[in-house]
Amino acid sequence: MGNAEMSGPLNGLRVVDFSSTMTGAQVTQTLCDFGCEVVMVEPPGGHPLRDEPAWPFWGRGKRSLVLDLKDPTDAETARALAAAADVVVETWRPGVADRLGLGYEAIAERNAGLVYASVTGFGRDNPLSHLKGYEPVVMAKIGALDAFSVLSDRPGPSFVASPYCSFSASHLALHGILSALVERESSGLGQRVETSLVQGILAHDTWNWLVRLMIVRYPEAFSAAPPTSQGAGGPVPNSPLFLRLMVGFSKDGRFMQFSQMSERLWQAFLRLTGLGELIDDPEWTGGRTPDDPEMRLKWLDRAIEVTRSKTYDEWLVEFDKEPDVWAEMFRFGSELLHHPQLVQDGRIATVDDPVLGPVLQPGPLVAMEATPAKLGTRAPALDADHSILSTLTQDFASAPAAPDDGPVDPPLKGVTIVELGTYYAAPFGATVLTDLGARVIKVEQLDGDPIRSIMPFPEVGGIKVLQGKESVAVDIASEGGREIVLALVRRADIVLQSFRSGVAERHGYTAKDMLAVNPDLIYLNAPGYGVGKPYGQRPAFAPTIGAGSGLAYRNLGGPANVPSDPKLSTEEVRVYSTRLAMATMTVGQADGFSALGVGTALLLGLLAKRRGTPGQEMSTSMLSTMSHCLSEDMVEYEGRRPIVSPSRDLLGLSSRYRLYETADGWVFLAAPQNDEWAALAAYLELDPTLEGDDAALADVLSARFLTAKSAEWELRLSAVDVACIEVATGPVEEVVWFSGGLGKTLDIVTEAHHAILDTYPRLAPLVRFSRSGTRTGGAPLCGDDTESVLAELGYDSERIAALRETGTIG
């Protein structure tokens, strides 16, 4: 059972995967890509995901072993495998592992070095722990499905198909596993790490949590408003920010996403389109500004007319004239695999399968110069590796027990990260590591990261992404500023940079520059598109990548549900473009997915370093991470069947996995498995023949659910172990923290301090450890730590004063 042919930062580590969900599959797929030997313990009949089109991606490189865990002999074999592993991954509901004799405590008695990862729907020990961890169940409970109501014509919540909870939780689990392995390098001890689907989706929010706080604290100054309001001519955006994130429509019928977030980008957009002349013309505006709803609607319609004056290819020519203006076209399905940037960067792979033939699929999550991933083996046939049991005593000898001295410091204590980047997608990847003990020194421009001022109330937009960090305000383009940055780098373990292509080169902050002063440095490029052409120099924000990756169309059920006839009226274009915009930026977005991927990348590099690899350059991107996020559709091979997409009304995927209206609201029913159907049919006394007629069953269930209230249905069907969850209404942050208080129930929220806001609510660390501690820091103001950090570097007070006088520091 050796793995000498593998390479990567995790080479030599063994993983036993008991999971049955996409979350677990993607955790171990990532571990396998980077060198782990992964043994999937599959039930008789195989893993539940084996029939999915993306199985060749999720299962690549792994080994398959069939065991019936209800059989005493097979269960003991599974325990022996787990006890000899470095990592165990399970996604059962709380209590299942213990009943099978495969719980953490039982296995750790035989192997104190084991890192044991558990992912549940709502956590292991709270009033909701018993609920089944289906993604829409979690989203219904916290109000996320209600938040997506803007996506459909009908009233009520909307089902979305993107894996906001599942993919995010897979990376939180990876954060726990990798940081525990980092800590194990010094302690020799493993531990249990835990996260949940609900924590996965809550990681996405950028600033709504804090905006809600302002509304609660200052009701006379601020009020809540939905993203859009219904006007006489259709939806009207409720914020001028919407104009900077507008969706245009080309002459040849392509929707395209603009993202002109900063003032510089916005002014470039106005110049290129000629719209600046109109906004400055009082005869056209009547003296009104975009703060006026009528003016926003008028301006948006005019902007739509401008964008449809050229084909998309003609706009590409215009964008080359003005590099600060960019619009990404909306893609769907596996189109992302052919994106020019992913092709240029080599971020796709072809794995030969003896049955399916060549399978095009996403490449490794991270490109690592010194410890690259090594792909090349297909997903295994069922039970293909049963012969490994013959080497059990030789290769799976249990590790000796070691003393456990109780809680210890955070697993990343002593790790220093220097952050060079703005906004959210890359920086939040470092933020989550501050909770795990890393010291993150954010090098900010003198007037602060632009995300600090993106909301009307100062600092609110940036608090979440800044919390736990130290802020050093430096003009990095100046000679003195460069000296400071390089001094920080000499003492750092990691540099994280997310500039557009060309910026690091222009200022001398490339990996080559940094490794020259610190050869042991881990240097991660984490831009939007990539580190070079054709798109690396383009502005990339969450909506841009959400459009280009296929996230928006995935949530809307595909292009068939969003007409794109070039003859659409302006009013029709506005309706559909608004819907597309909201499909990328409601509860979750590409920023959140990408940030969690950045956290994983940083930890892969750090673990490689702790295991003896010298410093290296690494790269990931928002675009490449989204190919992993949307992996259900990111494979191509002959005969591949399409995935099931939401219906046009966005109710769900089938009669047994969809939203239903009740006497007083809505529920989400999740009963896709045969045993769940049997329980549902028995309780409701349904005709058994309805199982084969999806439309008829939906009609019967629709009528039945109208006969009682949502809370009653949840209570009744939970009693027979069928997931039928009342859809919470109201913003997610309201449900989780404020009036709902669900966060306290689940013990996933806490409080921190801020110089302006005083005490404010924040998420607790997104991963829990059985031994290691965690931290919950607040957010600094811009430059709060400039003097203390410079003093630490050896700068005296006179030199610091001189740097401030020249404008080198702020």
Image (tube, rainbow, N blue to C red):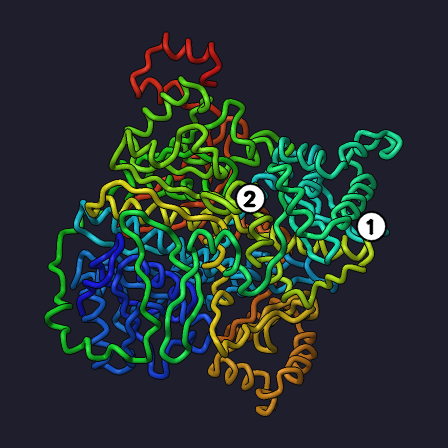
Q: Quadrant of the N terminus?
A: bottom left
Label 1, label 2: how many angstroms apart (C-alpha)? Answer: 31 Å
Q: Residue at x 60, y 48 (%)?
A: 543
Name the mark on residue 231: 1
Q: Where residue 273 appears, x then y in whole percent?
A: 73, 39
| Numbered circle sitting on residue 540 | 2
Relative side of 230 to 4, left or right: right
Q: Position of residue 109 (x, y in %)?
A: 17, 62
Q: Is residue 467 above or below residue 84?
A: above
Query: Measured from the top left, where is residue 181 in percent x and y?
Result: 25, 51
Residue type, numbered disc 1: Gly
Please report the residue visible at 70 percent of the width from the left and 37 percent of the height from the top.
272
Tell which residue pokes out farthest to the top in this image: 798
Residue 767's x, y, as percent? 37, 51
Q: Amino acid at mark 2?
A: Ala
- How packed is label 2: few (under 14 Cα within 10 Å), some, or many (20 or more)? many
Asked if labels 2 and 1 touch by Cβ distance under 8 angstroms, the answer is no
The residue at the point 22 percent across, 65 percent down is 106
Q: Secondary structure at mark 1?
A: strand
Q: Nearer the viewer, residue 478 or 89?
A: 478
Image quadrant assignment for residue 333: bottom right
Mark 1 Cα shell of 10 Å, populated few (<14), some (14-19), many (≥20): few
Q: Is residue 513 left or right of residue 472?
A: left
Reply above or below: 70 against 201: below
Which residue occupies 35% across, 59% down?
Answer: 30
